[in-house]
Amino acid sequence: MISKEQLQQLIKQGATIYKLNHLENKIETVLLDKKDYIGIGFSNEDVYVRGNPESKFYGAWYKLEDLFETEEDARWEIKMTTTRTETLKMPKWEEMTTENNEYNYYGSSDTHYFSFDNYRLIVSLEEDCEYIGIDVCGNTELHHWEDVTKENYIEACKLCLKLFKGEKENEKNTF
């Protein structure tokens, strides 16, 4: 997701902005050349770009939550977000491996967790016990115990999405 201020700055720079197309499950680019628009307005979490009729761009509405500065962030969002009656949005690697109060495990800055349903994704960066694990909340029954790497984290997120959707794990129990 992009902030209003960040979006305004990117538009001034003529940068490419990436937009999620949820209907087709793909990423699109939004190119806003200064000659194409005559104004930008914000309403709650939406942005309206008022087009310039001379350039044949008449304007568009975008949800800020669907706009991203980088294609990588947009790709992560579309691959690692799913919806049932509620939405599961997996934290990015950087959020889970840096000191971030939102994911700190009982005040520890070395262990981070993200809970959903009856599961918990844990990333422990403690010096003597580094691991990525998925457990059943309240128990310490780990489904997986892997080294802390970005690749293992991505695979753990994929497994979390499967668990959230109610899909069965592979027989091999691998990330």
Image (cartoon, grey):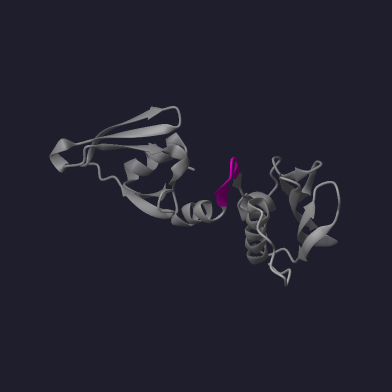
Q: Is residue 2 visible?
A: no
Q: Quadrant of the C terminus?
A: bottom right
Which is nearer the eye, 17 or 83?
A: 83
Q: Residue at x 26, y 37 (%)?
A: 59
Q: Residue at x 50, y 53 (%)?
A: 78
Residue 172: image x %, image y %?
73, 72
Which is nearer the eye, 154 or 8?
A: 154
Residue that extends furthest to the bottom in the rendered view of this protein:
172
Q: Quadrant of residue 125?
A: bottom right
Residue 73: image x %, image y %?
50, 53
Q: Residue at x 24, y 42 (%)?
A: 34
Q: Is residue 84 in the magenta section? A: yes
Q: Is residue 39 in the magenta section? A: no
Give the left or right position of residue 173, taking residue 17 as reference. Answer: right
Residue 112: image x %, image y %?
74, 49
Q: Which portion, as a residue range, is magenta?
A: 81-87
Residue that extends furthest to the top in the rendered view of this protein:
43
Give the left or right position of residue 143, taking residue 76 as reference. Answer: right
Q: Quadrant of residue 4?
A: top left
